[in-house]
Image (cartoon, rainbow, N blue to C red):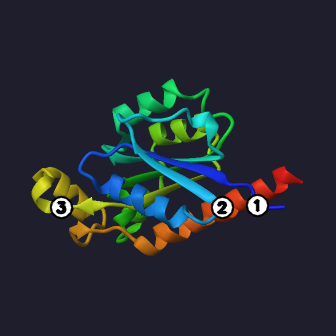
Amino acid sequence: MGTRVRHIAVVYATGRGTTGEVAEFIGAALESPDVVVRVVPIGHQVPDLSEFDTVVLGSPVYHEALMKPFVIFVYQRLEQLTSPDVWLFSMGIAPALSAGRIGRRWARAVPKQIATVRDALAVRGYRAFAGRCERGKMPVRAQLRYFLLGGRRFGDLRDWDAIRDWAAEIAVDSARRAEVASV
């Protein structure tokens, strides 16, 4: 008796491409002989998500909120997202904050709008990752706030090991749940 093939969708919104790169990375990390992964940006032909075993959703965060097209997409597809296991990730600068009590607290906090989406989806897991923080693309005021809250450097702040570990957590959970379901 063979292993049942599982289907995983990684669906994302992106502003400057960072979230898309992470979504592709997660998709590649989830692929295996018994897993078919489809990585799709919002705005393209997104399949019926209820046909997947697991759905991973991702969005950048701007001003402590997920992208508006992402939120609209999620709420339009809430019914499709009741049967698969759903995981959520976001990309922003808050996870890069490390210095000072305020910066560390802000880095760990889940903004209200993100918590609302997370809770509406009853996600199996949520993770915030640092993205790119490019000085030239940030208003001076935002740069100052970032620095005052503990941001110490600009550039590509993504922690690929942490992203890989999170994808591995999803893979293990998906395999375990598929095994339990087949018994």
Q: Are marks 1 and 2 in contact (CB under 8 Å)?
A: yes
Earlier sequence position, callout 2 versus callout 3: 2
Left or right side of 60 for 115: right
Decide: few, some or many residues near mark 1? Use Cα within 10 Å; few <14, some 14-19, many ≥20: few
Q: Amino acid at mark 2?
A: Asp
Q: Which residue is mark 3?
A: 134
Nearest to the observer: residue 23 or residue 136: 23
**Which numbered mark, 2 or 3, is in the foreground of this view?**
2
Q: Residue at x 31, y 46 (%)?
A: 14
Q: Amino acid at mark 1?
A: Thr
Earlier sequence position, callout 1 versus callout 2: 1
Q: Secondary structure at mark 3?
A: loop
Determine the image quadrant of residue 81. Answer: top right
Left or right side of 149 for 36: right
Q: Which residue is mark 1?
A: 3
Query: Residue 18, percent across and down?
Result: 30, 56
Earlier sequence position, callout 1 versus callout 3: 1
Rounded to the nearest whole Å, what is the CA distance between mark 1 and mark 3? 45 Å
Q: Which residue is mark 2?
A: 34
Left or right side of 75 for 144: left
**Which numbered mark, 1 or 3, is in the foreground of this view?**
1
Nearest to the observer: residue 32 or residue 169: 32
Nearest to the observer: residue 135 or residue 3: 3
Task: Give the residue furthest to the right.
Answer: 183
Query: Residue 125, percent across and down?
Result: 60, 53
Q: Residue at x 59, y 66 (%)?
A: 32
Rounded to the nearest whole Å, what is the CA distance between mark 1 and mark 2? 7 Å
> In the picture, which quadrant includes the N terminus?
bottom right
